Image: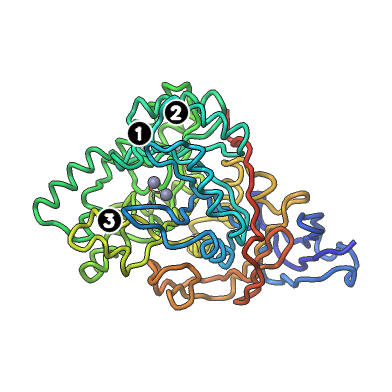
Amino acid sequence: MTGLLIKGGTVVGPQGAIPGDVLVVGEKISAIFMPGDGPVEGDFETLDATGKYVIPGGVDAHTHMELPFGGTFASDTFDTGTRAAAFGGTTTIIDFAVQRTGEVVQDGLAAWHAKAAGECHVDYAFHQILGGVDDESLKAMDQLVTDEGITSFKLFMAYPGVFYSDDGQILRAMQKARDNGAMIMMHAENGPAIDVLVKQALERGETDPLYHGLTRPEALEAEATSRAIWLASVAADCPLYIVHLSASKALEQVAAARDLGRNVFAETCPQYLYLTLEDQLGADGFEGAKWVCSTPLRSKHEPHRADLWKGLRSNDLSVVSTDHCPFCFKDQKELGIGDFSKIPNGIGSVEHRVDLLYQGVVDGKLSLARWVETIATTPARMFGLYPRKGIVAPGSDADIVLYDPSARTRISVETHHMNMDHSAWEGYEIAGKVDTVISRGTVIVSGDAYHGRKGHGQFLRRGLSDYLL
Ligand code: URP
Ligand code: ZN
Ligand code: ZN
Ligand code: ZN
């Protein structure tokens, strides 16, 4: 038997942080031993993990490679985006296949398979965006769950005319999800009301990027979140997952539903834990476009960030995903010069999520176990990938990160691997560093060296959520 023995590290998972040696055979984790109790050295290639955390590879449950938006496309391909993910310790992404309004769902899915096949450096799965709900798309939901390993569907209460579903459509999709066990993921912002505020702002000559955030107030995120939760209750408690939750009052809606025992979950993203509207205000004029995303960044003068960290501890927020949706400044963000509503929405972070959330450990806001839970274990369980992904345990895929808490890194466009001409995180100092990344038994990142390859990443058919009631 040949294998790889990861020796001397501290294995971290939801169970805590425990010293142990991990044996990898082929693509799987074969065994975990008490320190030094493993097989005799020499039979195995050995990786010295002394002083490092041995964690499951990150599972980023929300990315948008090549997303069409506002007449352009997100700038990372599956090739560049999954390579950047690998550098950042993420070994699984769940991207969103897109059905545009009027298109056949299966055609949208086939187009996504065509973009990703043979291109990915790490394993990947898909959620399906439904750009509207009708008899055909409801039938497609059954087919995707049964035959395609796609068990979650994103609906939009925002973006009328693009991806938008009205309340009746949402209810029908939720009833279908209740029947077939799928998860409904909701972009919870009141799009029609936002569109009124946007039009009024533009009429007043308020065209700068900062008006993006000011025309998407917290109330319209909280209202939509509450409405989605009530609609899910009418659909006999269909499982509901609120994406990219940014604000205190939206979190209150989720927490209240969860306190009632409702089948409601939410994710937040690193940008809402760290960045603020004031970062945008402080930027020079149109530079603020770099931080245009939806839901928007919130003000530092309100308690959003502290509340979101608290939500991560209390499990009212279960998952941290990136909502990685990169656009270059030149020619892409610049589409919105003179009209903020034309700035393509999104921030690129797929490379930085593991590092950024580790700062929560450094700052005493998260335990080591909770760090790993929110970036790997829970997203795997939430979206039907567990225990293949999200845990360092015998039988699981050998997707493993050695994380060095004593190293330091600094985020910059000069050194990142995402296909972007700027970074929303420029100059961020990180205490800790992804040291080694293993994907299905293969070392793909070692320090700053890359050993992976395009095409190594495989499509993952997902099962139903572990959190299904
Ligand atoms: O600004 C964002 N979030 N862009 C990506 C699309 C979405 O709504 O997730
Ligand atoms: Zn969204
Ligand atoms: Zn609670
Ligand atoms: Zn998104």
Q: Is residue 183 left or right of residue 131?
A: right
Q: Where residue 394 sits: x, y (%)?
A: 78, 51
Which residue is depicted at the point 55% across and 61% down? 82
- Colouring scheme applied when the structure was drawn: rainbow
Which residue is tagged 2? Answer: 173
Which residue is tagged 3? Answer: 299
Which residue is depicted at the point 40% across and 56% down? 273
Q: Where residue 37 sits: x, y (%)?
A: 86, 62
Amino acid at circle 1: Ser
Q: Up-down: is 127 above or below 419?
A: above
The mark that comes first in sequence, 2 or 3, is 2
Q: Which of these two is toward me, 359 or 418?
A: 418
The mark that comes first in sequence, 1 or 2, is 1
Labels 1 & 2 near each other (Cβ < 8 A): yes
Observer-side mark, 1 or 3, equals: 1
Q: Residues within 10 Å of mark 3 (few under 14, many from 20)?
A: some
Q: Where residue 45 sits: x, y (%)?
A: 82, 70
Helix, strand or loop status at disc 2 = helix
Labels 1 & 3 near each other (Cβ < 8 A): no
Query: Between marks 2 and 3, how big is the CA–CA gap?
Result: 34 Å
Figure quadrant of the N terminus: bottom right
Which residue is tagged 1? Answer: 165
Q: Which of these two is toward me, 179 or 68?
A: 68
Q: Which of these two is toward me, 340 or 133?
A: 133
**Location of residue 424 by image quarter:** bottom left
